[in-house]
Image: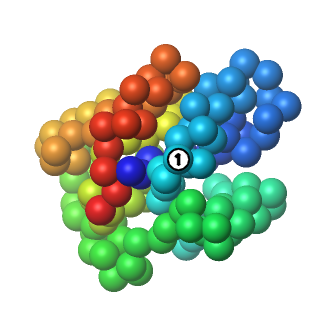
Amino acid sequence: MCIIIDANCLGAVFNSSDGAFAEDGEPIHKWLRKGGKLVYYTEGKFKDEIRGQARLQLQKYRRRGLAKLPPETAFNNALHEVEAKKHLLQSDDTHVLALAKATGVRVLFTRDKNLMNDFKNKAIIDPPGRIYSSKRNANLLHRNTCP
């Protein structure tokens, strides 16, 4: 089982002192302890968005087998596919959409409304993805498989 976590939601997963926002990340913590995984990438726009503690935490998760990276070629090919559909996008998150295409992961933790729309758009992501935006969506953590 896998999930993609948008940079705007990493604090909810990695920072337990972030109040109600952290409560939304708690089901992900529990799920990771039961065998769930998150996927991420370290180059391009991700390199700019994921820095400091978040980057260190992702590396720690990867060493523990809780996070994985897609092959570089697969990611780059998917990024080219998404960029060819840029005219359909509401968000500027081609890198997140490419990560979904490259890995087959169809659950995304985000609060970015435009990215939510893109992630659910079958013309961009096929099959379309599902959105985890709060702990109310914890049921999605049981439905997804990690390719």
**In the rendered image, which quarter is residue 71 located in?**
bottom left
Residue named by callout 1:
34
The residue positioned 48% from the left and 50% from the top of the image is 36
Residue sitting nearer the eye, 31 or 117: 31
Q: Position of residue 1 (x, y in %)?
A: 38, 50
User: In this rendering, is residue 103 above or below 110?
Assistant: below
Residue sitting nearer the eye, 93 or 3: 3
Q: Position of residue 130 (x, y in %)?
A: 32, 34
Q: Bin the neighbour count of mark 1 within 10 Å (Cα to Cα): few under 14, some 14-19, many 20 and up.
A: few
The residue positioned 44% from the left and 23% from the top of the image is 137
**In the rendered image, which quarter is residue 19 located in?**
top right
Q: Position of residue 87 (x, y in %)?
A: 24, 46
Numbered disc 1: secondary structure: loop
Query: In the image as oriented, which residue stretches furthest toward the front?
Result: 34
Q: Is residue 3 left or right of residue 134?
A: left
Query: In the image as oriented, which residue stretches furthest toward the bottom?
Result: 73
The colour style of the image is rainbow
Q: Is residue 110 left or right of residue 101?
A: right
Query: Split into 4 quadrants, where in the image is the C terminus?
Result: bottom left
Q: Position of residue 34 (x, y in %)?
A: 53, 47
The count of marks equals 1
Q: Amino acid at mark 1?
A: Lys
Residue sitting nearer the eye, 71 or 135: 135
The residue positioned 32% from the left and 44% from the top of the image is 144
Q: Is residue 147 left or right of residue 21?
A: left
The residue positioned 53% from the left and 41% from the top of the image is 31
Q: In the rendered image, is residue 45 in sight?
A: no
Q: In the rendered image, is residue 130 in sight?
A: yes
